[in-house]
Structures are given as C-alpha cells and as structure tokens.
Amino acid sequence: MSQVLCNILHKTALIQLEEKFRHLIISNNQLIRNKSINLPRPRLRNPTWLTKKHRSLEPNFLTQENKEFLKEVVSDKYQNIQPQSVINTNIEWNSKLKRTGLICKKIGVYPMWLQNGKKISTTLIQVLDNHVVKYISPEEHNPPRKRIEKIINKKGCLIIGAEAADPFLFTKEYCGIFKGSGVIPKKFLARFFVSPEAVLPPGTLLTAMHFPVGHYVDIRGKTTDRGFQGVMKRHGFKGMPASHGVTKTHRRPGNIGGGGEKGRVWPGTKMPGHMGNRYRISRGLKIWRINTKYNVLWVSGQAIPGETNSLVYVYDSLVPSKKPTEPLPFPTFLHGDELPEDIYDKEVHSFEGPSILFDESK
Amino acid sequence: MINTTKNFVKLKTFKVFNFRNVYRSCSTEASLNNTNEEENATQEGFKKSFAEYRHIYPEFLPDPEVKLRNVIREKLERKDMIARRSQIAIPEFYVGSILSVTTSDPHSPGKSETFVGICIKREGCGLRAKFILRNVIDHEGIEVLYEMYDPTIQKIKVLRLEKRLDDELLYLRDALPEYSTFDPNMEPELLVEGAPVPVNSLKVKLKPRPWVDRWERKNLQGVQDIDLPERFWVKAAKVATPWEKYDLMKIYKKTIPAEEQRKYTMKSNHNCKS
C-alpha cells in the first residue's frame, strides 16, 4: 500500500517538474519568436484517441452465405441509432456558450437572387450523416500539445463521425472508438470544442437544422493542392514585361533583397514554393437557404476552401460583428414536427415565386 | 398547402417539357393550354423527343468538367430550374435566333424594358446559363447579357427561330451594321408544327481591320471571303491546330458523349415526373 502511494507521489512530483521545465523552455522560445515570421507548419500530432483506421483486406475465406449473414448482423445492429441518454434541453442559449460544429461536404456553387433583384453566388454544403460518437470532459481532455497559460472556462470536446461505412473495412481498434455509442463505424471523425453545457449523448443525430437560416458560420477546409508554384500564381506578383528587350525573365520575382547592412535574404520573403493543400478558414458566411430533405446549406460566397466534393467543417461564426441576435437551438435542433423541404431567408427570392416587379411605392 | 403547390409545379413542368411544338410557334401564352399531344404520344415518340431535348435544353446537361459534378447538387439545381420554368416559359432558341426579352428594372420602378436582338452567344450550364443579345439602335451597336433564370426577367419571346452556320456569332461586332440591325417592333414569325429548325446560310461581310479578334484564324463559315494580305494567312496556317479534331481525349473532356446525354435527359425527366 505504502509502495503504491510512494509511486503516485513520485509520479506527481515528476509531472510537476516536467511542467515547470516545459514552461521555461517554451517561454524562452516565445521570446525569440516574437517577430511574426513565416515559420514552418507545426508537425501534425494526432489526438490520443485516434488509432490506425484501415486494415489490409486479406482473403478471409468466408463463404457467400457467411458474408450475407455478417451483413445482416451489421444491418440489424445499426438499424436505428438512438441517443444513449436524454438530451438536456433546459439550458437557454447565451453568447458565452459554444455549440458543436458539423462535418460537411462542399458540393458546388450556383447563383441565387435576392428580393431586390440582386444576384448572389452561393456555395452548397451538404451536411453528412453526423452522429455524436464520444464526449471528452474538460478534466479528461489531455491534448498532446499543452498550453502554458492556465485556461479559464475549459471546454470539453465532442467527437463526431460522418459517412457510415462497412465495419469490415476498418481495424478492430478503430471500431473500438464507436463501441459504447451504438453508432455504426464512420469514415470521417472530427473533434469540436464545446462548453460542458452543450454536451450531447452519443448516438445523437445532427442535421442541417443545427444552423438556422440567416445565421453566420465559419467554414474550415483544405485548399486545392496546386503543387510547386511560381511567384506570380502563389503571391500575385506582376512579373516582368512580355517585350521591350526583356529576356528569360517574364514570370520571375526580380529583386529579393537589399544590399549593405541588410545584404541578405530576409526571413519571410515571398518566393516560389508549394501552394495549397493547407487548412484555411473562411469566416462570417451567411446561410441563405436550407434544404431539409437532402440536408443542404446554401452559404454565401464561392471561395470556400477545398475542391467540389471535398470535406469541410462548419461551426458558428467567431466574428464578433456576426454573432447571432436571436437564440440558437441549444444544444442542437431536435426534430419534432415535419418541416418544409426548403427554408429561405427573408431577403431571398424563391425560384417557385413569381417574377420580381419593382413597385413605385418602394 | 405545401403538397398542393408542389403538385401544381409538377403538372406545369410536365407540360413545359412536352409541348415543344407549341413553343416552336414562338408564342409564350398559348403554350400551357394544349393537352392532346401528350395522350397521343407513343413510347417511341417519347424516346425520340428525349433525344432532341439535349439540343433544346442544353443547360440541363451536367457540367462538362467532371470534377465539378455532384449528383445531389444537380438534382437541386434542376429542381430550381424547373420551378423557375413553371413561372415563365423559356422557349427553345439557338445562336442566330431573334429574341425579345422583357425585364423589370429597379431604376425605373413600375415599368418594364424590352430589348430585341439576335442571340450571338449562349453558354453556361445549370442556373448559370446565359445568352447575349445584339442589336444596332440609333447607329450604335448594343449588346445585353441576360441570365436565363434571372427572376427579374418577365418574358422571353422568340421572334424568329433559326440557326446560323457558326456556334458563336461574335464576329457580328466587326461586321457591317446592317447584319445586326433588327426592328424593335418586329412581329413573331410562325413555323409549321413539327418542322425542323431552319438554318440560315447567310454570309456576313466584315468591315476592314482593326477587329476585336483575329477572325481569319477561326475558320468561320458564315463570313464572306476576307480580304487580307498574304502574311495574315501564312501566320494563320502556322498557328492552326488541324490535328485537334483527331484528339479524341480532348473532345471527350470538353463535351459529354451522346449516349450519356441521352441517359441524363431520361433521368432528369424521370426525376421531375416522380
């Protein structure tokens, strides 16, 4: 017994020491890196709960009958996914609470028209079959990269899965993530920080109605991979003239630094290099229309990061001027009565409506 | 309430899709009254007309860029297009046809504007479909670009349904003004029902250079002999790419094969029925 206690004490003392050292090291680095320099991208550290996803599909010598039986078992087991416990709907939404985001797919761009005759281009974003898989409380949350400063109002995380797939494609460990939740193993997983009040039980379905029409969202996606690009495409430089005696330097950057005391290439100089294939966020996009049948959001703008049919993550906007004025469905929208198929913003002209006429009175 | 409106839309769209011949006679009002032809049409007749729809409604075909396609987006887009077509009749027309378009303008409230002109370009798929009309008014060439599904458009009327020898008539900008002058008060010309669309083999005379484009390099059919010095033709022959018509992969990437088009038109019609 005493040995165990000793061990625990020893461990805690070590952890404390480590934390002190970490504080020292990182704060020193911070001082050096005070200047805003284009630093290399931080190494991707996967969260602790993520395991190897796909398994090698060896011949497993299953007969046709056995395969069909296994399919039947899967379909029976995951026929109706229900929330594991009751969702707490008593809490009123306020601006300090943070709700979960959704895993979506960018499916294309097309124009819409407003009631005043103005044309806007909108991006269609399809909300996939999002299910809550797991909740990690603020106390349990143990990220591989720790912050030095103390966090007030620590947030928990919701792990959300999208796009149901055949469980036999995945490893045993990956399927283990979904074990207690009753959710069929999903292709894509994402983690969203939420306030502890916005917790949702595993198995909860999240739909496009999570975001009301007229609400502003931020969208995070991976930009199109353009490969190694020159300075004109990557940074929008002007290049050099096409004629007037210019030789072999039509698309080059020109001068990249001064002489004398500054006689070197300064860090952060814009140069050719790899372009795209990085996560970028476009913020403060308005939702103009929602289709409840196919779970599609019409969002303003046509420059949302990512190609068509690529994955994006959508969450409530963090832009201060675009905070919602009316209360949001908290913790999420719960489907009760039947909804109309298309829900439009007040300003949007529906294609089913009559042609726009401008009155003199207005 | 919602269900009834839906049915209403469906009925109307069904009619819009099946009375091509009525549209051909160019009137927009008479189009939604006839009901006999649908009953008489045999299965084969249906198939034949489906094959023609891809020429009449080219914007219903999927994006030629395969990367930009998505089944659900296309379904929603077509639904919106049909919803708009239930409000105004967008008739069959081609590059070279003469149209009159009536729109409402926020700067002249309570009134409507009508523009008559020849269609010199038609492009875009889905709700992005658009066309350019050209006319010469008071000795001044005027072009207007219209979005086909813009709700400020009140009426689109075909005054003369015909095709020209080229896919684009942008060279009318450099032709003599008489070739793009049309009477704004023109009466619609009627065609016999079921007759093929006539091709106007008019050859246009271009003004002397300077032009907006190098027309001698475009292999234009609807243009009279261009009078240019020898060096222009030498350069044109140098930059010509006559092998491109044998580049099957390039053609495949640019266009949608006829079989696939037929499949798509059948599918979209099935969607709007069910």
Image (cartoon, coloured by chain):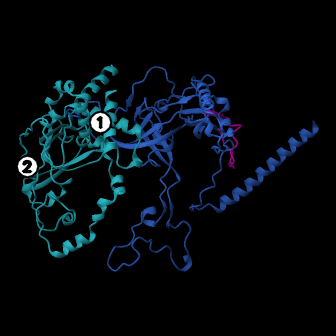
Chain colours: A blue, B cyan
Q: Look at mark 1 in the image and give the residue it sits on.
A: B81
Quarter holding the C terminus of chain B is: top left
- Image quarter of residue B264: top left
> What residue is rendered at 31% in x and 60% in y?
B246
Q: Quadrant location of residue A71?
A: top right
Number of callouts: 2
- Looking at the rendering, the stretch of residues picked out in magenta corresponds to A133-153
* Residue in front for this viewpoint, B166 or A162: B166
> In the displayed structure, would residue B46 be above or below residue A268?
above
Horizontal side of residue A284 vs B4, given as left or right = right
Residue A316 visible (yes or no): no
> Residue A252's quadrant in the figure?
bottom left
Chain of residue at mark 2: B
Q: What residue sits 67% from the left and 32% below the top?
A: A179
Residue B182 numbered mark, or none: 2
Residues at marks 1 and 2 on the same chain: yes
